[in-house]
Image (spheres, rainbow, N blue to C red):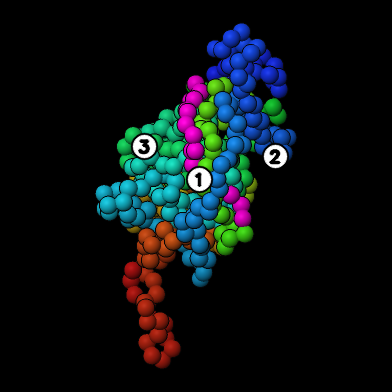
Amino acid sequence: MAYYRSVGVVPRTRHTAFRDPSTGSGRSGPLRYEELMGEEGFSSDSTLLYHVGVPSAVVDSQVWDLPDLSTTPNHPLKPRHLKLHDLAAPGSTDVRVDAVTGRRLVMGNGDVRISYVLADEVSPYYRNAVGDECVYVESGRGTVETVFGVVSYRTGDYVVIPRATTHRWLPGEPSRLYAIEANSHIAPPKRYLSKYGQLLEHAPYCERDLHGPAEPLVETGTDVEVLVKHRGNGPSGLVGTRMTYATHPLDVVGWDGCLYAYTFNVEDFMPITGKIHQPPPVHQVFEGQNFVVCNFCPRKVDYHEGSIPVPYYHSNVDSDEVMFYVGGDYEARKGSGIGIGSISLHPGGFAHGPQPSAIEASIGVEYFDELAVMVDTFRPLELGEAGLAVEDPAYAWTWAGRGPSTDTSDGDGTAVFSNS
């Protein structure tokens, strides 16, 4: 995020001796240890952090067994409806769940993984060394302690955490979290940025809507464990390590730069509307390598006298489309069984759009009270164990009003169908 911030105490000149100013004259106190955290081989955004302890001082390293990250192809090809609220909730067992180890994989591919958790427990310290994370808060509130300081989160926030950021989640109440984990970086769409990185006037949000840490968080302690997810040769291409640090990794007294954790709330997104129906890119909020993130927010809709506000049937020929329905009543899915907490997966190769009854019902409507988060991927998505566990098998047939029976023949080779 090319938006400069300076938090805490930093030296006047970078890469020079910086000592604890509270000790002696400032020239004889203990050194602060400078760490340059940079992207793309230090050729892109970076931040300089000043630690009390040595940030590379590890005293132990053990295997951390990651949760089930296996995937199943969407084959034979069909649209899917997944009911995430049917996944186990806190209180349903004696085991409390945190926002890191409690995540369950809903779907993913080689570019991005989508997981879900209802967290009610403080997480371990965690670092995703594979890519940035963009965690949408469906409901709940709390804080995330990071090496940059503390960010608070609330319902409707995207919590964007750069790759290799040490952090932990502290829910203030049970929090439904929809985690979008990239194998790349996540940033605002390039078309909304100036050549120097400023958000432009036609962008649906601006820098004042992004909320980063306001002050440093200086923790003390020894032998502190951090769970690290990183690249490896396992079946998913990911492995885990439990690293133990001699001093607390969240001991940064100051930092400055353009790389840090921040939040952005959907209430601050300004929908782009038009006289006739606008295409999905106007709803885009972030992008990563081979995927984009959009949000469909409450908004006034098309004002041409003959407009049809719900989407036309469309084939996004290069993408799989994942919609997570989190608020209101999504107009195009009325009559399909989709509700709050649902996911629809409309894969490439399948023309999709509104339920037939929704088209007529939308004509003349002036306002949509709906909220959904969309992820479009440019490689096919496969289903994780959580997605398979909560699928609604009837959804694929809702446009036709009927689907195949379990017995596909009446005995003489004639196909038999039953209403769904």
Give percent across and percent down for residue 289. Answer: 63, 47
Side of 120 relative to 199 (left or right): left
Q: Amino acid at mark 1?
A: Leu
Provide the residue designation for mark 3: 171
Name the one closer to the observer, 159 or 399. 159
Q: Which residue shows up at 56% across the image and 42% down it?
A: 59
Q: Which mark is residue 227?
A: 1
Per the rendered image, the range of residues in magenta is 215-232
How many neighbours does mark 2 have within 10 angstroms: few (below 14), some (14-19), or many (20 or more)? few
Q: How many marks?
A: 3
Is residue 196 at least partly visible in the picture? Answer: yes
- Closer to the eye: label 3 or 1: 1
Provide the residue designation for mark 2: 40
In whole angstroms, how far apart are the C-alphas of marks 2 and 1?
23 Å
Is residue 226 magenta-colored?
Answer: yes
Classify the position of the C terminus by image quarter: bottom left
Classify the position of the N terminus by image quarter: top right
Secondary structure found at label 3: strand
